[in-house]
Image: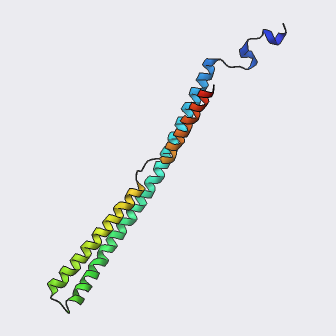
């Protein structure tokens, strides 16, 4: 026998099953921590966008309320030239109510498009990682 044939398998660079399992466990743990960091970063970014968007919508709503009050008064005054004031006010109120309903329906639809606020990229990354692990485990 040669000197190489007498050495145990571990000395030739082959790792034991226990060492391989330990290394795989460490790599999997590291991968999961990294995926959780990605999910956290994604959620922080999404929450910032929601917060900024919400603040802008609130500010625009306040300005719009004041503008609509002025517009309503103007339209009522103009219609009062041809109709009684109460009829003018009733017509303007009905038109503004219809407009408010249309805006609410549109806003609700837009908010549904943004939902659900979850880290979709991170979820897809974890799914891909799990699929890769399963493929490699089945291939061995």
Quadrant location of the N terminus?
A: top right
The C terminus, quarter of image: top right
Residue sitting at x 24%, y 72%:
97
Q: Residue furthest top?
A: 1
| Identity of the residue drawn at 59% across and 32% down | 135
Residue 8, percent from left and from top: 73, 11
Q: Position of residue 76 (x, y in %)?
A: 22, 85
| Figure disc tally | 0
At a point 36% along the width and 68% down the height, the residue shown is 59
Nearest the eye: 109 or 81: 109
Q: Is residue 67 left or right of residue 16?
A: left
Left or right: 101 with respect to 136? Answer: left
Q: Nearer the viewer, residue 127 or 73?
A: 127
Q: Is residue 8 above or below residue 69?
A: above
The colour scheme used here is rainbow
- Percent x, y of residue 105: 32, 64
31 vs 54: above or below:
above
Residue lying farthest to the right in this orientation: 2
Query: Residue 102, relative to residue 32: is it above or below?
Result: below
Quadrant in the rendering for residue 74: bottom left
Task: Determine the residue positioned at 65% across, 17% down.
Answer: 16
6 displayed left or right of 53: right
In the picture, residue 132 is in which quadrant? top right
Residue furthest to the bottom in view is 81
Q: Judge by depth and name the residue closer to the eye, 133 or 19.
A: 133
Quarter location, residue 131: top right
């Amino acid at each position: 026998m040669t000197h190489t044939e007498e050495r145990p398998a571990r000395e030739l660079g082959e790792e034991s099953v226990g060492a391989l399992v330990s290394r795989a466990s460490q790599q999997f743990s590291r991968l999961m921590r990294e995926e959780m960091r990605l999910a956290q970063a994604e959620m922080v970014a999404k929450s910032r966008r929601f917060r900024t968007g919400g603040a802008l919508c609130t500010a625009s709503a306040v300005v719009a309320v004041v503008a609509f009050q002025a517009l309503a008064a103007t339209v009522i005054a103009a219609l009062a030239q041809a109709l009684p004031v109460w009829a003018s006010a009733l017509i303007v109120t009905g038109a503004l109510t219809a407009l408010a309903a249309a805006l609410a329906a549109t806003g609700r639809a837009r908010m549904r498009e943004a939902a659900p606020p979850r880290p979709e990229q991170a979820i897809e990354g974890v799914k891909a990682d799990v699929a890769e692990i399963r493929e490699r485990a089945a291939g061995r």
